[in-house]
Amino acid sequence: RALKHPVPVVIDADALFLLSQFGPRHTGTALATTLEERRNATADRGSSSNRIAPIVVTPNAVETRRLLESFQIRSPQEWVRHVLAPGDVMLEKGETDRIHAVCDEAHEPEPSCVTVDCAECGSPRRCGGQGDILSGILATSLAWMGFQGESASALVAAVGASTLTRRASRAAFGAKYRAM
């Protein structure tokens, strides 16, 4: 239901697991149908006017593998091009966060994907809940930016959230070391 409203959506954790259950083997499900409708609506609009609000998915390595297997796709860039609509983003969490965005321009036979790496130094210890903090920063950034129909807003928010989370993690480690 949230995907049908004109507000940005962050998909993380259990929602990513749910999304991985609706690959091509499960066409016709409400989630698969809604994603397909979003892609078609964007393609029908053609121009940058009347954009839909972006979706940002934030999988870690295990969740990325699950999504790729479920959709029978080989790479995150290919997944983004085939599943998401222009302006949508995948923030692939890892040692280096990789942010993949569907480009706005119409490319035949499929849209293109741009990838930005966030190699900001984080902490040497990954603590539990860091992904939750990233999602919260991302949702807040999207809300503060407002959705003005800018296709790059989700990409900018994702890079900012990744950078801020990594800096905060580094600062926490500097203050508390392994006890963080």
Image: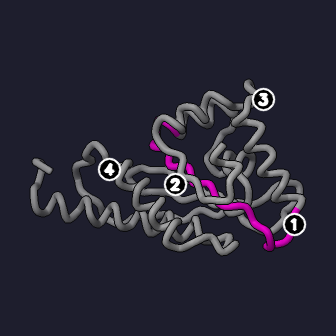
Between discs 3 and 1, the one toward the N terminus: 3
C-alpha span from label 2 to label 1: 25 Å
Q: Is residue 49 left or right of residue 152?
A: right
Between discs 4 and 1, the one toward the N terminus: 1
The three-letter code of the residue at mark 4 reads Gln
Q: Which residue is mark 2?
A: 91
The three-letter code of the residue at mark 2 reads Leu
Q: Which residue is mark 3?
A: 27
Q: Colour mode?
A: one colour
Q: Name which quarter of the figure residue 52 lies in.
A: bottom right
Q: Find numbered disc 2 in the image and state the secondary structure of the residue it sits on.
A: strand
The three-letter code of the residue at mark 1 reads Gly
Q: Which disc, if any, is residue 130?
A: 4
- Residue at (75, 60) in percent of width and height: 112
Q: Is residue 95 left or right of residue 68?
A: left
Q: Find numbered disc 3 in the image and state the secondary structure of the residue it sits on.
A: loop
Q: Which residue is mark 1?
A: 46
The three-letter code of the residue at mark 3 reads Thr
Magenta-highlighted residues: 45-63
Residue contact at pointers 3 and 2, CB within 8 angstroms: no
